[in-house]
Amino acid sequence: MTSSLINSITLITLALFFYSLGVWAERIASYLKPWHLFAFWIGFSFDVSGTWLMHLISDDSFSLLDLHTFTGQLALWLMLLHAGWASWVIRRGSEEARRGFHRYSLIVWIIWLVPYVGGIFLGMCG
C-alpha cells in the first residue's frame, strides 16, 4: 500500500468522522449550532482532499458511468449543498429553520455512506 493511498484513506476516514459528528450531534440536539456547521465544512474539506488524492493515484479517469464515481460525486455535491444551506441557516435563517434543519441531514449522510462503504468494498475486492 502506497503512502498516497494511506493518506487518501486517512483523509476520507477523517471526513467520515467529522461529517458524522456534525450530522449526529445536530440531529440529537434538534437544533443547528455553529460548531455543527464547522464539522460539516471540515468533513467536506477532508472528503474533497481524499477524493482528489484517490483521483491522482487512480489508473482510470473519473467516469460518471462508474457507479462508485457517480455516487461519490453525488455525495460530494450533496455535502456541499448541505454545508452551504447550513451556512445560510446559521447566518440568516429563522429559529424555526435552525430547528427543522436536522430532517435532511441524515438523508445526505446516508447517501454519503454509499460511496464510502462502496470504496471499502472495492478496496477489499481488488
Image (cartoon, rainbow, N blue to C red):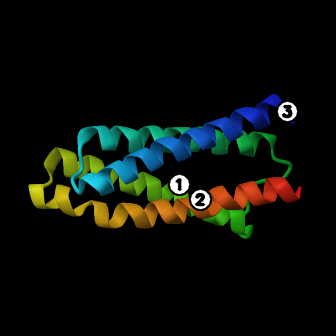
Q: Relative to the observer, which residue lies in front, 27 or 54?
A: 27
Q: Position of residue 111 (x, y in %)?
A: 52, 65
Specify few, some or many for label 1: CA neighbours under 10 Å numbering under 14, 14-19, or 20 or more: many
Q: Amino acid at mark 1?
A: Leu
Tag 1 and tag 3, C-beta contact below 8 Å: no
Tell us which disc is closer to us: 1 or 3. Answer: 3
Q: Residue at x 38, y 53 (%)?
A: 24
Q: Amino acid at mark 2?
A: Gln
Q: Residue at x 32, y 43 (%)?
A: 37
In the rendering, which numbered label is found on residue 73?
2
| The furthest residue to the left | 95
Quarter of image, res 119 = bottom right
Q: Is residue 8 left or right of residue 110?
A: right
At mark 3, the secondary structure is loop
At mark 2, the secondary structure is helix
Marks 3/2: CA distance? 24 Å
Marks 1/3: CA distance? 24 Å
Residue named by callout 1: 76
Q: Relative to the observer, which residue lies in front, 30 or 64?
A: 30
Q: Position of residue 22 (x, y in %)?
A: 38, 46
Q: Position of residue 91 (x, y in %)?
A: 18, 44
Q: Amino acid at mark 3?
A: Thr
Specify few, some or many for label 2: CA neighbours under 10 Å numbering under 14, 14-19, or 20 or more: some
Q: Is residue 120 left or right of residue 94?
A: right
Tag 1 and tag 2, C-beta contact below 8 Å: yes
Tell us which disc is closer to us: 3 or 2. Answer: 3
Q: Is residue 113 above or below residue 44?
A: below
In the rendering, which numbered label is found on residue 2?
3
